[in-house]
Amino acid sequence: MNRSPVTNKPYINDAVIGNSSMLVALDARGEIHRLWWPHVDMPQHVETMKMGVLVEGMQASTSWLDQAEAWRHEQSYLPRTNILRTQATGKKVPVVVATTDFAVPDEDLLVRNVELTNTGEAKLTLTFFVYASLQIAENALYNSVSFDRVIDGLLYFRHQYAFALSGANVCAGYAIGDAFRHATAGYLPGDTIGMVPHGALAFRLSLAPGETRALPLYLTAGTTVHEASAKMHQAKRVGAAEWLARTEAYWQKYLRGAKPLAIRDKQVQAVYERSLLVFKLMSDQATGSVIAAPEFDEAFTRCGGYAYCWGRDAAYITTAFDQAGLTSLTRAFYRWAVLAQDPDGSWQQRHYHDGRLAPSWGLQIDEGGSILWGMHQHYLMTGDRSFLEEMWPAVEKGASFLLSYLDAETGLPLPSRDLWEEREAEHTYSAAAVYGGLSGAAAIARELGQTALATAWREAAGGIKRAMEQHAVDGETNTFLRGIKLRVSEEEYREAVASGKSTAMETDEKGYTRYLLMQDNVLDISLIGLAVPFRAFDVHDPRMVATADAIERACTSPVVGGIRRYEDDAYIGGNPWILTTLWLAQYRIQQGRIDEAKQHFAWAVKHATSLNLLPEQIDKETGETAWVVPLTWSHAMFVLTAHMLAEAGVDAL
């Protein structure tokens, strides 16, 4: 008896809530599809969590609230909080179900405060069902569910993870195993325990016409069933109203501690506020790690793997933290980054919250450069010399590794994966990030009295800049190349030879041959990074101007606007991205072309979701959200661009 409904998890999250140790993703109908605990990146425990209503005398079977044909849905966050309210209005029954979802700060507790209203003219008797399938640690095997009479609810457990599910009201019935079928039929048979991942609870209510009754539901988490049970007792003892008040006060205090934005536009303010709230959700409270986004496709049926920490993303994100006055989040991140650094001084592609290497496909040299650059940016914002002293051993090792990773022939960083993680070459953006990292490290060394190292690192950065000028500029167009020594297939190599392009072959010590295209001419938004943020070249440098203008011509999406990553991008169909469009906006601001920057910025604001979350991509034909919600880097670029506009004197769009 272990059947459950077939669940097609959405690729896109509509809403997120959490408390920096518990992170929850929901759809627009209020169904919970994912829940991470005790860290925001792993493990993920929920297969699905549904709620439904069976009105006596009006329905033959339970109407689940996620059924669009039966319910009309509205969803919003409570003002200035990460508290989500989803209202389902019955199309066939006179019932409104309003659910307020939130994770309580500093508690392993999710509250689903359900309120049911009879909108009809006659008394209603109904049964409210809660169905939860918890594949603990993303594993369908070896789960167990039991009904516990002491907590009057269900206990889900597997190895070191346990969850308790119960309500403030007295449970009227329960089922374990084939629970969804039973709940849909309206009867729970009361099995006591089963080695299955799913169970259901039922609650009986009577509602007079116009009456509203509350049904608070609690999900607690612990490392043992006893711990989860104890937390359930506490949840019921305190009560939903008090938990709500505490959580609301917490988020409002958090926002009061942030830096306000001078731009008055109402929608800009809304997206800015939501960005700050997202920042806290994506920052792991225990470790300081910052994830790129909530994982959205665990099965990798199309793509996945965003619930990790990338040093590259984090360098932009922490700079946005600092701009918004959230400097403690930045400090916590860089303390984590020291733990994630390899003994040789490198930082690898991406990591788990504990600093261990996540599933990866090779070194990306811009990661280490970005982290060193970000450390220096934090110092520039805070003036905190003790931070530099704390970071110094990691800075020294990190800079030494960057120096060891230079191509003696070209002076550029040796081949590695590009920032989009798609190709191997000596990438110009990666060189700019290493330039920024060494320049930042040199400034840190100078501040700490390490004069010899400061001079050596500054000179090394200068050498990388000269190498970019020598090897990474297209002489015909006076624009920067995306890279050199691009690794291609043998077929692509032969085609390049036939067309007269510059090529090369290299054979390694094992006898494997690498086929190289000596110039990568594709226009890529990342080339803006040479000026913004890494300042290897001035924004007014004619080569930068020509490059930026060429990128805008080649990468503007023709139907909906916005900027694609590069001119032949095919990822998820080749859509414009939020962060790429804002990247160009930042360049235009520094050029002084404010009106153009405002247009790009307004495009990003326009394409926030209905809950003011920023996705990764926008569908190139429809203008709808296309992928990954929320993307922390998108929110970071929004905050950075907003403050740049405000500093340029823009106070309204």
Image: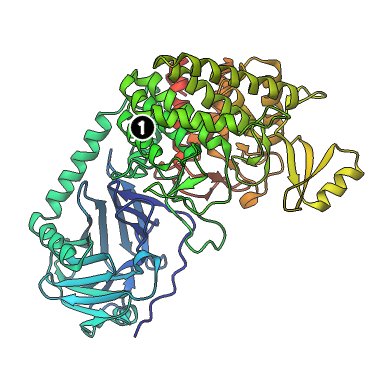
Q: Is residue 372 above or below residue 141?
A: above
Q: In the rendering, at what x and y percent does residue 411 appear?
A: 68, 27
Along the line of sight, the residue nearer the viewer: 303 or 72: 303
Seen from this angle, which residue lies furthest front?
A: 509
Q: Is residue 125 visible?
A: no
Q: Is residue 442 visible?
A: yes
Left or right, 589 with respect to 166, comes to right
Q: Which secondary structure, mark 1?
A: helix
Along the line of sight, the residue nearer the viewer: 234 or 289: 289
Left or right, 370 with respect to 613, comes to right
Q: Residue at x 46, y 13 (%)?
A: 451
Left or right, 628 with respect to 380, comes to right
Circle 1: residue type? Thr
Task: Determine which quarter of the picture holds residue 216.
Answer: bottom left
Q: In the rendering, at what x and y percent does residue 457 appear?
A: 54, 20
Q: Residue at x 58, y 29 (%)?
A: 403
- The residue where tag 1 is placed is 330
Along the line of sight, the residue nearer the viewer: 235 or 158: 158
Label 1: how many Cα within 10 Å (few below 14, some 14–19, many 20+): many
Seen from this angle, which residue lies furthest left?
A: 237
Q: In the rendering, at what x and y percent does residue 140 appear?
A: 39, 73
Q: Is residue 267 above or below residue 386?
A: below
Q: Which corner quadrant holds the N terminus?
A: bottom left
Q: Residue at x 67, y 21 (%)?
A: 544
